[in-house]
Amino acid sequence: MTSVLDVKNLSRAFGGLQAVRDVSFEVQEGEILGIIGPNGSGKSTLFNCILGQLVPDEGEVRVDGQVVTGLRPSELNRRGVSRTFQLLQVFPQLSVRENLILAGQEHRGSRLRRLFGPRDAGLTPDANRMIDFFRLGHLAEEKAGGLSYGQQKLLDAAMAFMAGPRLVLLDEPAGGVNLTMLASLKERLQAINAETRATFVVIEHNMEFVMSLCTRILVLAEGRLIAAGTPGEIRSNPDVIEAYLGH
Amino acid sequence: ELSGGGATVGNNWKNGVELAAAEVNAAGGILGKKVEIPAVDTQTNPGVARAAIQRALDDKPVAILGPIYSGSVKASMQLTADAEVPQIMGGEAGDLTAQGSKYIFRTSFGQNISMPKLANYLRDGEKAKSVAVVFVNNDFGKGGRDAIIKELNSRNIKVAADLSTEAGQADFAADVIKLKSANADAIFIYLNEEESARFLREAKKQGLNKPMIGETTLLGQKVIDLAGDAANGVKGHVGLTVDAPIPAVQEFGRKFQAKYNYKPDHNGLKGYISVYMVKAAAEKAGKLDPKAIAAALHGMTITPDKVPGILMEASWDNTGEIDRISFLAEVKDGKQVITQTLPKLKN
Amino acid sequence: MSRSALRWSLGLVLLGLVLVFVPVNLTDYGLPYPGLKRYGTYIMTLWLVTAVAAMGVNLIVGYSGQETLAQAAFLGIGAYTTALLTKAGIPFGLAFAASGLLAFVVGILLGIPALRVQKHYLAFVTLAFAVMAWLVFRNEQWLTGGVMGLSGIKRPVVFGINTRPFLTFYWFVLAVTAILTFCMWWMLRSPWGRAFTALRENPVRAESLGIDVRLYKLLTFAIGSAYGGFAGALYAPLVEFIDPSPFALSQSFLYLLMVVVGGAGSFLGPFVGAAIAVLLPEWLRFTETYYLLIYAFLVMLLMAFCPGGIVALVLRLKAALLPKAGKVQP
Amino acid sequence: MDTDHILQFNGVVGGYGKMTILNGTTASIRRGKITTVIGPNGAGKSTMFKAIFGLLPLRSGRILFEGRDVTGHTPRRMLDAGVCYVPQGRNIFPELSVRHNLELGGVALKDPSGLPDRVAAMLKRFPILAEKASSQASTLSGGQQKLLEVARGLLLDPKLILIDEPSIGLSPLMVQEVFGILKGLRDSGVSILLIEQNAKQALQMSDYGLVLELGQTRIEDTAASILADPRIAQLFLGGGLQPAS
Amino acid sequence: MAEILQLVIAGLATGAIYALAAIGFTLLWQTSQTINFAQGEFVMLPAFFALVAMNWFGWPFWLSCLVAILVSVLLLGMVFKVIVVDPMLKQGVLPLVISTIALGLLLREGAKDFYSAEAQPFPYIFPDRQVSVLGVQLSLSQIGVLLIALAVIAALQLFLSRTRTGRQMQATAQNPTVARILGVPVERMILYTFIINAALAAMASLLISPIYLAKFSNGEHLGLAAFVAAIVGGFNQVRGAIAGGLLVGVIDNLAAAYVSTGYRQSVPLILLVLFILFRPQGLLGRREERAV
Ligand SMILES: Nc1ncnc2c1ncn2[C@@H]1O[C@H](COP(=O)(O)OP(=O)(O)OP(=O)(O)O)[C@@H](O)[C@H]1O
Ligand SMILES: Nc1ncnc2c1ncn2[C@@H]1O[C@H](COP(=O)(O)OP(=O)(O)OP(=O)(O)O)[C@@H](O)[C@H]1O
Ligand SMILES: [Mg+2]
Ligand SMILES: [Mg+2]
């Protein structure tokens, strides 16, 4: 197995606050990794550092063995890494379908080719499939800004899949999503994972979701990695219960 | 120039023109025809000026009166030349008449005439050995500055400082400080009205007590009103002024004041005269034909006894340049006082 | 070809014909239409030139959600480039291309630093640039003629035809505008156009979807500015004289104003806006000096009741008059 | 007057533009109890809250609060009547400090003198917020921001609290904490109307449940019987989400 | 040396006036996301109100000044807010910006068409006398201007940061929807900022007009100076606007004395660009970071 994502000694501070401290981990191809931890433990910051949204103070990130620290998010995305956001991030004035086409178009041909190619970059069928899956069919032509919270959350997730990514970083995909939908989302992630060996890293506070989806889980507290293991191990780890799970 | 930076100037001109037009019409018009003078705004923008003149030309006029700003004139004089319509304008830039147009006529001295007169005055009247020049960085100011510096050099007068200021500048503190250290025998000020006033106020505040010399504008009523006490003692050369010791001119001033409720500046006079120029030339040519009027104006001298509205005797040469008497003046107790009358250059 | 496409192309052809013949005096051909005279044609030409510049502003402001207060300065760059090059004997075609290119390059140079800053700051950077460009036009007399301007700019000879006559020049500008309009339309309907909108809507998300936000921002800004340059290249031979005043900051404000008045982010917006800006002074001529006052007042009224501009207003009226469209509220 | 029910919805119809979202919604919320609203995404739950709080013009129907008609009242009037609302999503003042954000929760207090004490008590309750009391709110993590909002919403003494998915982004421990506070409030007599996607946990601590679908009330019952209903578990509680061990 | 000192003091006096305009500008930006491109005209106009009071109605100067401030508060504050800003608040930033550009045009043209196209002399509020302090010539008028401006600014700063109303105004600025949900009387808060802005602008107007002469086109320069001051000081900071205003005033004056006149206008603008590039949070501003 090769490691798709390799994070070494990553640190990032905001002023005096050390949000991420010396975090290292590897993700193997085809893995579904969960990251949990109390509020403010640095999970989102970790994602932002990996994805180039923030510049880490120290440490190195490799994707497929290549150093990507300091690359901009768009560059990473074009290398097959996509993400979702904790807070809603869609294009409010574009329709749901346009949102999805937009999410895939930078992966179709060269920039110049796109200028002279078809308007939808040939992505309408893909977009429609995605819309069907997330049950947004009746909303395909609606402006994304008018969707309910959970629907926008789903759209955000759908966008991350449009480009057929190899590595997806999901920041709380379950927040606000209906449990039934969540179950299908889980199945879908597992199916994609089985089919294309795409790799997932998921931040989540919904324990049922994480525990049933992930094969391995990392626990962050105050910016530090405090535990790692299978769902079963994590659930019974007293430190984790103390810092995070309660009872 | 009814709006934009030249609004004051343009409105003076327009009112002068309308005053004259009303008189001419009351007296039966030109060659029996009433004159109609529609006003078109250039917005003090040469591009717009060009369009405005184009529009005016579409109506096949006998003559175009204006514009006043040299930049606007420059942008449009090619058009009037092409259309063979005389353009009687207020521009004072020296090179306007040097472009070879047969259809351009001045109503006041170009800088190429007024500056030599001023330089003479600086040499003979003020006995200045060095002069500091303050000018405004626009077509008006820069043209004047180039002309005066040439004249000063040719008279061996030192240019002690050469200060450019911005059009619309509000604060002259720094300029006055610089002038103080230049220590020239006299200061030549070539700014627009408001800037002149601000400058004079600041100069007084900082105790700059050198002779301050200027051209028509600096001694204008507007500057005196705005600058208050600070204008007293300013001297200079004046091409046209309602304060001229000539009854006809003063009479014009009264009529204007009565009709528009303010005292006209030289642009009001220029506008007024322009109408009578057309009248005189048309009557000389005997027909209301643009080409004939232009031809008639070349080399013509109009005297007030024949055409009272011309106010002062004036002649035009073949390039459209004007010749006329002019004045030296000084501001005393908030009033412009003519101290000397300078003769026409050629007789 | 689908029916709506057919309708569209028919409409376009018709519009084209109208634009081509509007200034022509048809009385010689037995039609009771006197055409526009020299001045009317001049105004039509000015409208086209203004619309080209406004299209650029619309790309920057309406589509990609940035701000520019420097379009007049870019117009100036184009106008001076064309004036100087053609006066030096270089053919107009090259001068035209050079004008656009120069504006493009300056746009990039200006955009690079401006990209580092938050949204509204770009407006202020361009504002500063606009003033500085204007100062250069005024002060570098050796190059630009300073406040005296440059006169004697020749109209080009195209395929052996001299465009000096006003009608010929109008057609020439019309053709150039048509080409530039087509290019703009094509670009906006391509995936690039969608990416531009993404910048406007949510740059953070766009970046994470592989859209090179910096590059696209630069591109839109530079292309929009290049349209300013092209417009300038047409403006110089139109007026045959240039000086700094039409390129001052206040004029840049007017370009922004006309785009929003027409309808920012709508394709026809700039044409409508430019028409208003150029023609309104004509219509309001009877008000003499009050027309700017009235213009300003109308703009405020429009913004209050229909911030989408005139294009949106027309659409709204249409929806109101054709009841089947139903009630549309924001 | 109906003393049992604090809030009543009678055939409420409303929506956005030409879309109708609330389709004749009818419901009664009990006084002094916790009622949880569940339903699929886009069912109109948040829209229902907006309607109550005067943020959505209604096409028809009436909303009664304590038996009085409050249809179309402004938010301020609802606050003064004793209703407070914690909306969904991110709703902080990003450039103000955490403390100032909290204090603004007390704007509608009749007697502002007690505000400092309440703020202090709230900070004590949520030590993460206390730690960051003087930081700019935009620098909080997603969950911390949500917590700040919840804390701010609880500063007043309302009769009825509308709280829209407070658990989004909160760690399990924090969810327990927040739910604990809600229970405490209920015990002191405050009525609570809660929207949750985290339905099982929410229903477990609630007294009543309300299932909303396509803008209409499907089921109104006690929380316990909703939890026990296998049909509901299948449809709304994500039957497929069983932990893999 | 004395020369430089004189220039600096004159610069501080004008800078304090810029600061007044800049503060109003930032306040409006904060509460209603209004980039007020008519701010320069807001400073230009009140002098004309005073002139009208003096010249048309023959009222004494002090009364005219008072009237000017009141009329400004009414027209440039309340009426502006209710008629121009209110209908547009929900429409987003761009229409409002455009509206203020148009309003600027309207005020400029209005002052010109209904009062005069020409500059008008305006009396000095303080006696225009010189005093010599430690060998340096200072003008009483400049010192007076500086003191007034600073006092006003200090009071405002206290109001905003210490009072509940001030806090509510800030909340309104950052998130009006939520502020409304929490019971903040958003409309009233926004109205306050407009009133404050108008009052500040009126004061700036009365202080600057003796130097500039009252003229319809003064707004262009003043508006630009206010923007530069606001940005240099940090867009979202009242304190910053003061520092920015003073800095711009001084730099302006030094540039006028020591930089080629053709380009001296560009010096404050270069300052502006440098700040935007290297210290976008402004002189005293804090850097905003956004978490995603
Ligand atoms: N501002 C808006 N403009 C237009 N449509 C809207 C708006 N807000 C919500 N909608 C539509 O109304 C419907 C209901 O939205 P609402 O937010 O009430 O759902 P919800 O039940 O709260 O869902 P969720 O669980 O996802 O929060 C959705 O289909 C959505 O598309
Ligand atoms: N831009 C910033 N400026 C200052 N501090 C920040 C910034 N962004 C995050 N922080 C701080 O860093 C810490 C980690 O934040 P982060 O968003 O990574 O937490 P998280 O683990 O994602 O939490 P949650 O589960 O609540 O989303 C928090 O204490 C937060 O306050
Ligand atoms: Mg997070
Ligand atoms: Mg909701």
Image: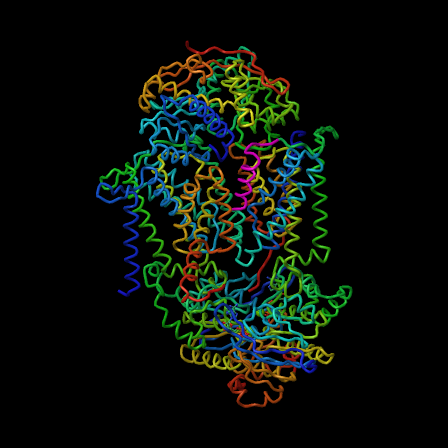
Instruction: Considering the whole magenta stretch, tell me its main secondary structure.
Output: helix
Q: Would you identify the image quadrant in which residue C238 lies?
A: top left
Q: Residue at x 70, y 43 (%)?
A: E150
Q: Which residues are magenta?
A: E102-120
Q: How many numbered circles does the render carry?
A: 0
- The C terminus of chain D: image quadrant: bottom right
Q: What's the coloring here? A: rainbow
Point out residue C266 in the picture as x, y percentages from the top left corner. Answer: 41, 56
Q: Is residue B146 above or below residue C264?
A: above
Between residues A67 and A191, which one lies in front from this camera angle? A191
- Side (left or right) of D215 relative to A240: left
* Quadrant housing residue B289: top left
Q: Position of residue D117 (x, y in %)?
A: 77, 67
Answer whether residue C256 is visible to the viewer in this image.
yes
- Indicate left or right for B142 with E74 as reference: left
Placement of A28 over or under C109, stated as above or below = below
Residue C104 appears in view? no
User: Residue E291, percent across and down?
Assistant: 57, 63
Relative image position of residue E12 (x, y in whole percent): 66, 38
Q: Is residue E111 magenta?
A: yes
